[in-house]
Image: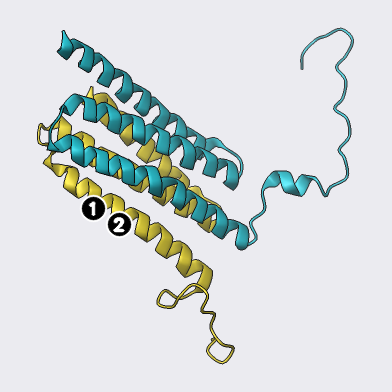
Chain colours: A yellow, B cyan
Amino acid sequence: MFLVAATALLIAMVLALIRLFIGPSLYDRVLAVNVFGTKTVLLIGVVGFLTGRPDWLDISLLYALINFISTLAVLKFFRYRRLGDAAGDRPTPEERP
Amino acid sequence: MIELVTDALSWLFILAGSAALVVAAFGLVRLPDFYTRLHAGGVTDTFGAELLIIGLAIQSGLTLTTVKLFIIGLFLFFTGPTATHATANAAWVAGLKPRLAERHDEPPEQPPPIGRPGGDRP
């Protein structure tokens, strides 16, 4: 049962990687990375059940947190070209390169 | 008896979740436009993840593992649509237009050619 789920997750991860490599725009790649991260969270949990040690779910939860934050960080960086400021803080004209 | 019922239920949930995830991944590769791909990668992915986590939780019973699975499922339930919306919003602000919106500006296409009266297929 867990082997079926792990196989399906691996197939889905390979397909997400295909979209990641051929994606024509940046946002396709961001979406593919997000989907890949969700599949990784599930795969860690399923492999934990498969080996009889479900303690790996802590790592899975941590990976879910990192995945969400990294998606938002990449999107914010490509929209504002900086990460440190607040969202409404546009660069002044003399600061622009 | 109870064990048989819980096994069957978790089988059902895990198989449905795996099928949803594989279908979502195929849609992510095969669909023609970014926004349609977003639909495949956002909606179906969250659905399949929730189904898979429910199946694992049924399998593990009333233990601490179920609490962890519940926390992961709750987190994915909220962050998946949020990340999808953030991606769609960023793409829209950056000027990526869906394919259907471009077609409205074009002149109407020629009507499709009517098949020959014999009814033979090309």
* Image position of B95 with respect to B85: above or below: below
Which numbered tag is attached to residue A66? 2
Which amino acid type is shown beneath numbered disc 2? Ile
**Element assignment for label 1:** helix
Which amino acid type is shown beneath numbered disc 1? Leu
Q: Do the residues labelled 2 and 1 touch (CB within 8 Å)?
A: yes
Q: Name the residue under label 1.
A: A62
Q: Quadrant of the image for the N terminus of chain B?
A: top left
Quarter of the image where one finds residue B7: top left
Percent position of residue A67, x then y: 33, 54
* Image position of A1 with respect to B34: above or below: above
Percent position of residue B22, x then y: 41, 30
Residue B86 seen anywhere in this rendered image of the structure: yes
Q: Residue at x 54, y 80 (%)?
A: A90
Q: Which residue is drawn at 89% across and 10% down?
A: B117
Q: Residue at x 51, y 38 (%)?
A: B40
Q: Which residue is drawn at 61% across and 40% down?
A: B32
**Which residue appears farthest toward the bottom when viewing the image?**
A94
Residue B59 in the figure: left or right of residue B94: left
Q: Which residue occupies the foreground of this view, A80 or B99?
A: A80
